[in-house]
Image (tube, rainbow, N blue to C red):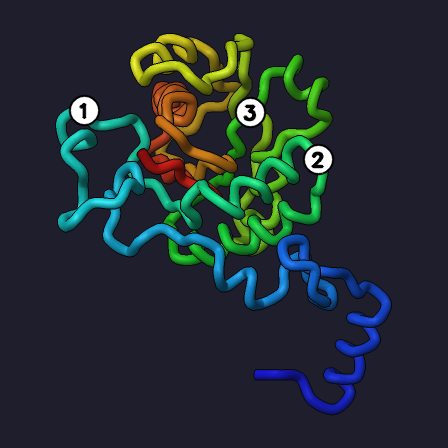
Amino acid sequence: MRPSGAGDFAKRIFDGLFAQDCLLCGQHSGGEILCRACADDLPRLPASRCRRCALPIPSGECCGRCLGRPPHYDRTLAVFRYGFPVDGLIQSFKYGHRLAIAAFLGGELAALAKDAAVDLVVPLPLHPSRLRERGFNQALELARPVARALDKPLDAGACRRVRPTPAQAGLPWKERKKNVRGAFDCARELAGRRILLVDDVMTTGASLDECARTLKKHGAAEITLLIAARTLA
């Protein structure tokens, strides 16, 4: 429902003070980074997808790969397909330091996870060397609005990336798993906790799976991945 009276007047003042153009089409979008039309047109994942890894499947709850070789995480919630123009938005967020995009993506993630049974929100950690290079952890910036919206504690120190790893891009799946083996350490006892593990993009899920393995070694009962964009084959 649109605000009326004083509320509508306040919104017009806000839009006038903080007016901006849509990052995608350049049209006026008020106080939002995307206009409504562009936001509605972003490529979302289909409804029929694997509960475990979020890849599209014709029917059923779990794909053959997850049935045959179950990952350490229990469920994946993902909003968008990683493709145009979502890939550009995420790259602008990560490498162009457009942190306002985190608020938009975080809102989408929070809406998707609103009914998830979780006790703790944990961002996928960056190694300190990568953190110094980038200046911020994109997963943490996404996790902040999620934790606020769900009214759940955010623990950015629950898991640490203790081993720097070469970039995963271009490596086959088996090599990716070897690449991240032992890359994480957990600083908490998580007995019985249900974890919401947040990241921006999921490709093979090797890093997320290794982090989930580490968290479960320290007692986590259930791990749900919350991902802004899922790469499809």
State the image coordinates of residue 92 (x, y, percent, origin top left): 65, 39
- Tell which residue pokes out farthest to the bottom in this image: 5
Residue at 67% x, 53% y is: 23
Which residue is at the front of the view, 14 or 209? 14
Residue occupied by mark 1 = 69
Residue occupied by mark 2 = 96
Which residue is at the front of the view, 104 or 24? 24
Residue at 62% x, 83% y is: 2
Determine whether, in the image, residue 3 is placed left or right of residue 166: right
SS assignment at label 2: loop
Q: How crowded is mark 1: few (under 14 residues within 10 Å), some or many (20 or more)?
A: few
Task: Specify the amino acid type for callout 3.
Answer: Pro
Residue at 80% x, 71% y is: 14
SS assignment at label 1: loop
- What's the CA distance linking mark 3 and mark 2? 20 Å
State the image coordinates of residue 195 (x, y, percent, origin top left): 42, 37
- What's the CA distance linking mark 2 and mark 1? 37 Å
